[in-house]
Amino acid sequence: MSELSWDDVVEMPDELNDETAEALLEGAIEVQDMTGGVCPYPQVEAKKAIAGLSAGDVLVQKTDHVPSTENVPKAVGDDATAKVWQSGDGRYRIFLRKE
């Protein structure tokens, strides 16, 4: 498999297969497992983590809480670009790239 980049997430967020999503997770600077966590905890943790990253770094939050897929990107605002990937079995990945 070739090296994956942020552009893969931006261009095909709804077309990522499980193998590609896992490969992108491996390239992330930080991964937060928020499975079972509910708002506002994921938003708070995302904001804290983004503040400590450098421009271009990627944070990934794993979640099964659908409202987080909207609330986390809103919480980080202009500090990060957010893309959401759904696995098809109720699991999500929120990819946050520090601006």
Image: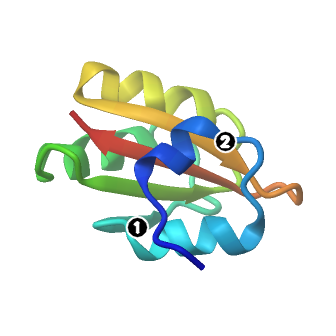
Asked if residue 68 can be seen in this view, the reply is no
Q: Quadrant of the C terminus?
A: top left
* Nearer the observer, 43 or 51: 51
Q: Quadrant of the N terminus?
A: bottom right
Eye-nearest disc, 2 or 1: 2
Residue most extreme to the front: 2
Image side of residue 13 versus residue 72, left or right: right
Residue drawn at point x = 88 percent, y = 60 percent: 89
* Nearer the observer, 85 or 6: 6
Identify the residue position indicated by label 2 in the image. 12
Bin the neighbour count of mark 2 within 10 Å (Cα to Cα): few under 14, some 14-19, many 20 and up: few
Image side of residue 22 versus residue 81, left or right: right
**Quadrant of res 37:** bottom right
For marks 2 and 1, the one nearer the N-term is: 2
Question: Residue 51: where, in percent of width, then height?
Answer: 14, 43
Asked if residue 86 can be seen in this view, the reply is yes
Question: Residue 40: where, in percent of width, then height?
Answer: 46, 37
The label on residue 31 is 1
Task: Tell me whether circle 2 and circle 1 mark residues in contact (CB < 8 Å).
Answer: no
Name the residue type under label 2.
Met
The label on residue 10 is none
Residue drawn at point x = 59 percent, y = 37 percent: 11
